[in-house]
Image (cartoon, rainbow, N blue to C red):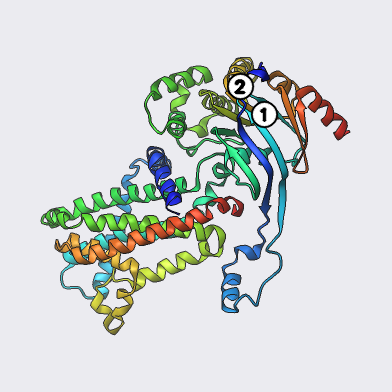
Amino acid sequence: MRNTIHSVLRYSFKTRKTWWFTAIAKTKARYARTALGSFWLGISTLMTVLCLGFVYGTVFNVSNFKEYFIYLGIGLVIWTPISEAINQAPLIFITNSNSLKNSTIKPIFFVCQEWAFQVQSFMQAFIMVFIVFLIFSPGLVLNLVAAPLHFFNLLLFIFWLQLLISLLGTKFTDLFQLLPIITNLLFLLSPILYVKKSLGSFGFIADFNPIYQVLKLLRNSIIYGLPYFQLGFIVLIGNLIMLFLSIYVYTRMERKVIFYL
Amino acid sequence: MINKSNLKVEPIIELENVTLQIPLMSKSDFSLKRKIIKSVTGGGFTRSKDNSFVTALNSVNLKVYKGEKIALIGHNGSGKTSFIRLISGIYQPTLGSLKISVKVYPMIERSFIVEEQLSGVDSAKAHYLMMNNSLKGFQDFLEDITEFSGLGDYIFLPLKTYSEGMSARLMFSLLTYKNHECLALDEGLGTGDREFYDKAQVRLNDFLDSSGSLFIASHSTELLRRFCLRGIVFSGGNLIFDGNIEEALDFYEKYHS
């Protein structure tokens, strides 16, 4: 088992330049005909924050709009790669079936490529939104010191979640239809548009939502500058366990994936 | 041409009673609902279609030695492409033993790695990275590709602006740039327009001549005779003949008729 997990990790590392490049190429292709290119990643997030901020800020009767915009903006930027990773994962092997059937490229390559695509999109959107927020709240830049562990947790979380869903989604094609519904529900159940105390006695829903736990630690470390080391390490351990578990499932299913396509 | 007496004794590829079964997935195999019902009812609710499969290769025994150039002969659906996928590592045998000590490079149906909104340069870069895991030497590669394909400045334009012939020329140039220790080619490589054909033939000949070991699956007896000394004939997933190329072609002709 160890050798197989090791060989998956080794292959992923060996081909890192290729999947990183093809992920960049995917972004370039997506925005090839636009004047602003990948700037749209940040612009679309900022526009969403602006619209939702005014509407829900008014609905929830927030007292400080500046703080609410930052809370909502950072939360949305972190939520986007998570939901995109979940929703796109079932299609990873299907959209690359030609390459999988006719070349020696391993399925994990395309999972890494999709992960790199989500990471690159996230980084571009995050940098742009963060720079805009710095204009209103320059102190945020110092808070970044508290965030590296939680950034790392987010990247790990997206990877194993995507890997696991891509394997399940290839076999159970219903998942592709089901997952967008689940992610929408999770979005509404996670304190992103609102603060946790608004859930009242239903606050436990957020406590048992693993996506929210990853999101919350990163968002709060950036907004409040608190490192949350203890919780961060617990999430890290959970992520590492799930990473190895998902790679193990992959090693068991790698040879079968091609037959589902 | 290869002299068999000079070949190493140890085979580079060895198949012993190799069977490849491709499972046929029914709609119920992909159904989450059915899996949930099955788990809830403890397997009481099942269908007996779980074991449906196609036998793509059946008890194949074969030894291939270094430097051998082998023709894969058979009608469509006889098992040639499955055999290429098997020795390339795309498929794993269901039964039997498969030992391979070389990296087999398959050329089956190829398409550009990047999307068509991107340029020929991007496509070449992705292909080069895939082959080498690094961009060291990429400029020389790009110059060779650009010159040989005759694309000129079109190499900087998006792939979607290419004609079918231009795409085929670029694809051919990318695929035949590097020699391989063991190459498995399924049918000929498209070469695009007529004026490129002669140039491509010379390169294809050099490319195939210089590959260490070679498998060619083709219906062109001219191509098979040009490059291969040995021929194996497939029918319905069974290896039914293995021998000299002329004998193999004669056998196939008689068998087929």
Q: Disc number at residue B208?
A: 2
Residue sitting at x 58%, y 20%? B207
Q: Hey, what amino acid is under mark 1?
A: Ile
Element marked by disc 2? helix
Q: Hey, what amino acid is under mark 2?
A: Leu
- The answer to whether residue A77 is seen in the rendering is no
Question: Vertical placement of B14 versus A45: above or below?
Answer: above
Does the CB distance between marks 1 and 2 fall below 8 Å?
Answer: yes
> Could you tell me residue A101's position as x and y percent?
59, 44
Element marked by disc 1? strand
Q: Which residue is mark 1?
A: B216
> Could you tell me residue A260's position as x and y percent?
60, 54
Return the disc, 1 or 2, that comes first in the chain's sequence.
2
Question: Vertical placement of A20 versus A193: above or below?
Answer: above
> Callout 2 environment at 10 Å: few (<14), some (14 to 19), or many (20+)?
many
> Could you tell me residue A90's position as x and y percent?
50, 57
